[in-house]
Image: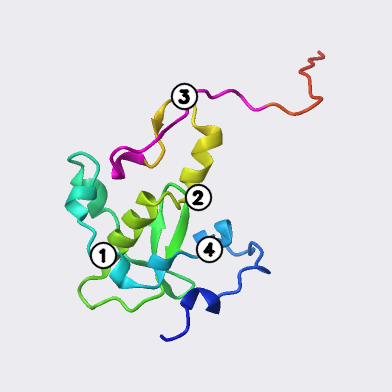
């Protein structure tokens, strides 16, 4: 594809749909380069990126489909991350896993973005997928609404 694939998707006028599922592109209003270019995920070492010794976590990640487009499910956002490149036959789950790991390591998961405001205990911002990740949740306070006071009447 000679044209920049990100320019093919004008997301400025997109709104959330009323269909049952929601994808990452709808939630964030953006796409990411590794959704379009397999070379950007080819060198990811899945064994090294797996948190601890929990290989079962990685084995649960499979290539799926959202709106007829190959996608991987990001459970931290509860949404699909679409993959807009041709995946070599027989390597479907491998590429789904690599795209998801890249997404998590770069901090682009909507669920990770929400950690800054909502993490209630200290934890790695980017989870266990990236060493030396910043810590979030050290100073959590419950959210408040301006001019709202608790009042109970019985």
Q: Can residue 62 be seen in this view?
A: no
Which residue is denoted by mark 2 in the rendering? 110
Q: Nearer the viewer, mark 3 or mark 2?
A: 3
Q: Which of marks 2 and 1 is nearer the N terminus?
A: 1
Quadrant housing the C terminus: top right
Crowd band around label 1 with a 10 angstrom C-alpha radius: few (<14), some (14–19), many (20+): some
Q: How crowded is mark 3: few (under 14 residues within 10 Å), some or many (20 or more)?
A: few
Taking depth in this image into account, of 18 and 23 the one nearest to the observer is: 23
Tell me the distance, in whole angstroms, between the alpha carbons under discs 2 and 4. 10 Å
SS class, disc 4? helix
Numbered disc 3: secondary structure? loop
Asked whether 104 falls inside the magenta stretch, the response is no
* First reached walking from the N terminus: tag 2 or tag 4: 4
Q: Which residue lies furthest to the bottom in this view?
A: 2
Residue bearing the label numbered 1: 93
At numbered mark 1, what does the secondary structure look like: helix, strand or loop?
Answer: helix
- Residue 4, how many percent across, how many down? 47, 79
């Amino acid at each position: 594809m000679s044209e920049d694939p990100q320019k093919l998707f004008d997301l400025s006028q997109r709104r959330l749909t009323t269909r049952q599922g929601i994808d990452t592109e709808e939630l964030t209003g953006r796409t990411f380069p590794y959704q379009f270019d397999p070379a950007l995920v080819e060198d990811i070492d899945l064994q090294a990126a797996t948190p601890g010794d929990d290989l079962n976590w990685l084995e649960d990640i499979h290539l799926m489909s959202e709106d007829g487009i190959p996608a991987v499910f990001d459970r931290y956002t509860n949404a699909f991350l679409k993959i807009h490149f041709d995946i070599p036959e027989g390597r479907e789950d491998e590429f789904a896993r690599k795209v998801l790991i890249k997404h998590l390591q770069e901090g682009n998961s909507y669920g990770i973005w929400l950690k800054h405001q909502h993490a209630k205990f200290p934890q790695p911002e980017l989870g266990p997928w990236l060493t030396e990740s910043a810590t979030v949740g050290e100073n959590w306070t419950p959210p408040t609404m301006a001019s709202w006071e608790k009042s109970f009447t019985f």
